[in-house]
Image: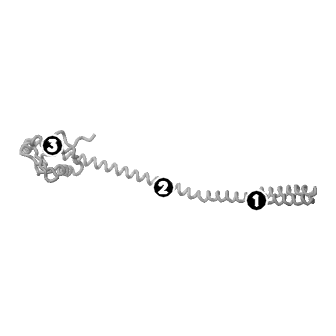
Amino acid sequence: MTPPVFAHGHLRLYLLSLLDERPQHGYELIQSLGDRFGGTYVPSAGTIYPRLAKLQEEGLVTKESDGRRTVYAITDAGRAELASRQDELAEIETDVTDSVRRLADEVRSSVNDAMRSLKADLASAAREARTDTSHGIRSAEAIPEAAQDRDARAASRAAMHEAEAALASFRADLRSELRTQFAAGTLGTDGPELLVRRLDEVRREVTAALRAR
């Protein structure tokens, strides 16, 4: 757990030291503290204003309205408090210096961690990109084969439809011829026998030709 920047009661005394330099409003005090800590520590308004109110209650500071702002100033009682606690104030300044170093180290460590995390993320993204590219290449290589398979299946389906259409047309033509001869009374007994014999010959010839491909 990160130790507090100010020990108990030290922020109150440090605010008196800042007001001893010049009167300031609350936001200026927050900025002054941020400047002293190099931006590594900036107290919230909820931290500063209750302490200023307590200092006012104790008669160590006063406040006056300056337009929309409230300006705080140290009183003689506040200066006497500072004078009686100079040794403690010196210790606070040393603690502030140590706190600035500690916070700077934490920020530096956080930045380093963030940089390492960023590098890891970039490396991971690069690996994923290479993997995607590799998959893309393999997929691209597979596309012509897949396209050829699709084309072959499409050609086979077309050929099958054409063959079925040819068979249907052949059957229809033969049926029409047989019916015509039957209607004319010219269909002898040798006609069907001839048809069966020749169809069987055609079947064997076509089957042999297809299997020989």
**Position of residue 49 measured from the top left corner of the image (x, y, whole percent):** 18, 45
Q: Which residue does the numbered mark 3 point to in the structure image?
A: 53
The tag earlier along the polypeptide, 2 or 3, is 3
**Position of residue 182 measured from the top left corner of the image (x, y, whole percent):** 90, 58
- Using residue 61 as the reference point, say whether residue 171 is left or right of it: right
**Which mark lies nearer to you, 2 or 1?**
1
Circle 2 SS class: helix
In the rendered view, tell whether residue 3 sits above or below residue 143. above
Amino acid type, label 1: Ala
Of residues 56 and 133, the one drawn nearer to the viewer in this rendering: 56
Circle 3 SS class: helix
- Using residue 178 as the reference point, say whether residue 145 is left or right of it: left
State how far apart marks 2 and 1 are (Cα): 52 Å
Q: How many dots with numbers?
A: 3
State how far apart marks 1 and 3 are (Cα): 101 Å
Q: Which mark is residue 1?
A: none
Image quadrant of residue 181?
bottom right
Image quadrant of residue 209?
bottom right
Amino acid type, label 2: Arg
**Position of residue 200 measured from the top left corner of the image (x, y, whole percent):** 85, 55
Label 3: how many residues lie within 10 Å, few (<14), some (14-19) or many (20+)?
some
Amino acid type, label 3: Ala
Q: Which mark is residue 165?
A: 1
Residue at position x 56%, y 56% from top?
139
Circle 1 SS class: helix
Asked whether disc 1 touches disc 3, contact meaning CB atoms under 8 Å apart, the reply is: no
| Image quadrant where one finds the C terminus | bottom right
Residue at position x 40%, y 51% from top?
121
Q: Which residue does the numbered mark 2 point to in the structure image?
A: 130
State how far apart marks 2 and 3 are (Cα): 62 Å
Of residues 82 and 63, the one drawn nearer to the viewer in this rendering: 63
